[in-house]
Image (cartoon, rainbow, N blue to C red):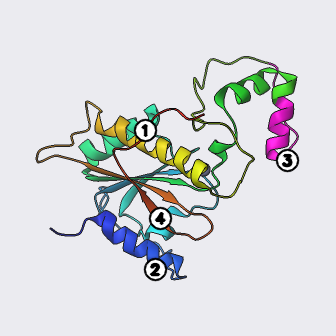
Amino acid sequence: MAASETDRFLENNARYARGEALHEPAHPGKQPIAPARHVAVVACMDARLDVEDLLGLQTGEAHIIRNAGGVVTEDALRSLVISHHLLDTREFILVHHTRCGMLAFTDDLLKAGLEGDAPAGKLLGQATNRRFTACGKCAASPAAFHAFRGAPEPLDAPPDDRNRERLAWDVRRGMSAILNHAWIPTQGADAVTVRGFIYDVDTARLEEVSYPGDVGSIG
Ligand SMILES: [Zn+2]
């Protein structure tokens, strides 16, 4: 079986982790609208991730969808459905990463802090080493922040088995949301493949998340 584009990107990632620069920054000139590698990536917005660099992607090769956590939200699904059905992407790649800020709070805590709950604000200030300023108002949107499930830990805490598992759970949650979506085919001639990874911001290496696997609760 021919290597997938994702496998090629994993080889690129190993080279990036060894210090090679693969992404060409110069504008390549006129290109088609559809991504040349037929790939869409969903990745965290974290400032330490240069998605093109760490996968060795060139301009024009892939869609890159980024948000806090690289979470497969309703909006990410909207983009993926458009990416596949209108622009012919066939491989989806999810990228979470170590030391992610989404490990350091809960939705309830952030919401309470924003609304003006003083203890919540104090905790958020301690977690982020930044003075947290409440807004003192309620809001209907966003309905969720999608902080990762499990007990929050200090911001930028080093990787360990527990937070790796929390990351893996959210990767699998995203894979499940994609693989079970009514408008994302996973069988037949128009099938899409989905693979999920945790990027180590300290070593620059991607580690694949097994699927299926645990998606359950954490203490
Ligand atoms: Zn992150």
**Is any part of residue 133 visible from this angle?**
no
Q: Quadrant of the N terminus?
A: bottom left
Dot 1 or dot 2, earlier in sequence: 2
Dot 1 or dot 4, earlier in sequence: 1
Query: Are dots 3 and 4 in contact, CB under 8 Å?
Result: no
Q: Which residue is mark 2?
A: 15
Dot 3 or dot 1, earlier in sequence: 3
Query: Are dots 1 and 2 in contact, CB under 8 Å?
Result: no
Dot 3 or dot 2, earlier in sequence: 2
Dot 2 or dot 4, earlier in sequence: 2
The local crowd at label 1, few if under 14, some if 14 to 19, many if 20 or more residues have their Cα within 10 Å, is many
Residue 173 numbered tag: 1
Give the residue at the far left of this rendering.
Answer: 189
32 or 63: nearer the eye?
63
The local crowd at label 4, few if under 14, some if 14 to 19, many if 20 or more residues have their Cα within 10 Å, is many
- Identified at 45% across, 39% down, the residue is 72
11 horizontally vs 164: left or right: left
Q: In the rendered image of this protein, does residue 118 appear above or below residue 67?
A: above
- What whole-number distance in Å separates the C-alpha atoms at marks 1 and 2? 29 Å
Q: Which residue is mark 3?
A: 129
